[in-house]
Image (tube, helix red, strand yellow):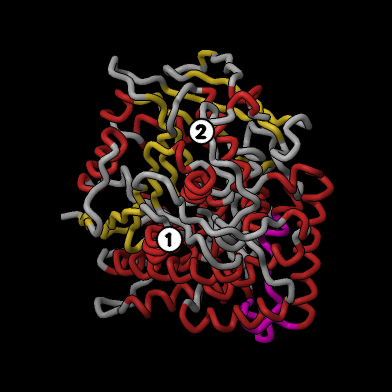
Amino acid sequence: MKTTGWITGALAVVLVAAGCSGEGAGGPGASADPLSAFHTQEIDWEDCGGGFECGAYEVPMDYEDPDGRRLEIAVKRLPASGADRIGSLLVNPGGPGGSGVEYVGAAHGVISEQVRERFDVVGFDPRGVGRSNPLYCLETEELDDFLGLEMDSEDGDGDPTEVTDEGLAELEEANRGFVQACQDRSGDLLAHVGTADVARDMDVLRAVLGDDKLTYLGKSYGTSIGTYYAELFPRNVRALVLDGAVDPEGDQLEISVEQAGGFTTALNAFVGDCLALPDCPLSDGPDTTVEEGVDRIGELLEQAAREPLENRADDREVNRPRTEMGVLAALYSESFWPDVRAGLADAIDSGDGTALLQLGDMLYARKNRDEYENSTAVLVAVNCADRESPRDIAVYEEAARTAAETSPLFGPTLAWGALTCAYWPEEAVAEPIELDGDGAPPILVVGTTRDSATPYQWSEDLAAALDTGVLLTWEGDGHTAYRSGDDCVDQAVDTYLLETTAPAEGTVCDLP
């Protein structure tokens, strides 16, 4: 689940539109199935290098009108390496906006060898993402301006809790402009990119691949896809792993503020690790506390608001929001910590913000100087479509002040980040439903205690909300747990995928 600079809030969402029958392609009434033409299609697989096969399949844009416009969904698979094949393992890396096609390309690293022996590993780009009828909003230069929009605050340091009237007007104008651009560039597709439709697309893929039941690994926002699938098609579930879960309840503003708590926990872990090193740029001496290290980052953000850092890459200002995005990049994985430490050292020692700018570009998939992937557009569209949001800007202003009390560095920013959804077309927002997966077999929810983007509490909440949810806890850092270096987690997930045997409820894994 991705997050924001100053605009988009939490990276995944859950509550959704009208349900489906829950019947699979082979269930009762299959002969009258209005989707039979989709379930029985064949994918023309082509070799796309490295042992992978690529293709596409079709789905209705609107499942209430299956004879209407069709969408083409890109798909990629790595065939099982062993002879004793179980079926297909569908995977999604999160987002919203993450490419399952690209994720499968890393299957040798993100899926264990014993699972790859028994399953074809299959990823697809959800509708609106990447190669699957991509949804677009702002052009590159406009998106640069949007992501780099700085608050006009009372004291001039970009403080998001003290926004002036002029600043509020600018925020409203920018977010309305984003929504209008989405409507202008994406048209009817905008109302059909919610997670319920993605889950339905995944069931079509299950049928096309010839699997009676779905085996699935979803990370971050991918847990939302799996949760919806369990609700819509509980009898079609074989095994679902939901790693780094998104809370199934709450509006988009509430989710954004809660996410700030996760980033604060992860930031404290990052700073604590930094201070234990001899060259930490946040240290004023051996007695520097984590709180003092975090304050040093806050001072850097204020400095960047008053005078942007140097940028040796292009003509963008490395102001407060762009500096903050670079710091946020550190919090998704421990593997990024050395790069962010180096970027902070450049910024603090010499005023050079280039490295932090480039880390922020990575976070928002700015592929080069001239182009973004469309993941930010999808992130906003799905977040706003899946959950209802407050429509009064004063509610966001108050939420920013409240969030500052518990998450002073990121809370206000993330509260304002949900504002785009206040202007989302109401007809494109799903009606909330209860997501409990009634009728599904045991579903494995994996939560990391110091997860940044999806706070551990969300995994606890999702496991409790699902009728058959089983929680596996990892005492660790970073965003998501499977294949992150802990054998206990990996073995528990692999056993569940291979044998459909979940670990005992309450199992806790911890790196030695």
Asked whether, in this view, residue 6 is left or right of residue 22, the answer is right
Dominant secondary structure of the magenta stretch? loop
Q: Which residue is mark 2?
A: 102
Q: Residue at x 30, y 30 (%)?
A: 115
Callout count: 2
Q: Which residue is mark 1?
A: 465
Crowding near the residue tagged with mark 1, few <14, some 14–19, many ≥20 C-alpha atoms within 10 Å: some
Q: Name which quarter of the figure residue 23 lies in.
A: top right
Residue 11: x, y in percent? Answer: 55, 56
> Dot 1: what SS?
helix
Residue 231: x, y in percent? Answer: 51, 48
Residue 497: x, y in percent? Answer: 31, 36
Crowding near the residue tagged with mark 2, few <14, some 14–19, many ≥20 C-alpha atoms within 10 Å: some
**Which of 448 and 407 lies nearest the eye of the viewer?**
448
**Which of 168 and 466 lies nearest the eye of the viewer?**
466
Q: Is residue 242 above or below residue 498?
A: below
Residue 1: x, y in percent? Answer: 50, 53
Kind of residue indicated by mark 1:
Ala
Residue farthest to the left? Answer: 512
Asked whether, in this view, residue 353 is left or right of residue 86, the answer is right
**Does residue 363 show up magenta in the picture?**
no
Kind of residue indicated by mark 2:
Glu
Contact (CB < 8 A) between labels 2 and 1?
Answer: no
Q: Name which quarter of the figure residue 507 lies in.
A: bottom left
Which residues are the magenta region? Answer: 144-164
**Does residue 145 show up magenta in the picture?**
yes
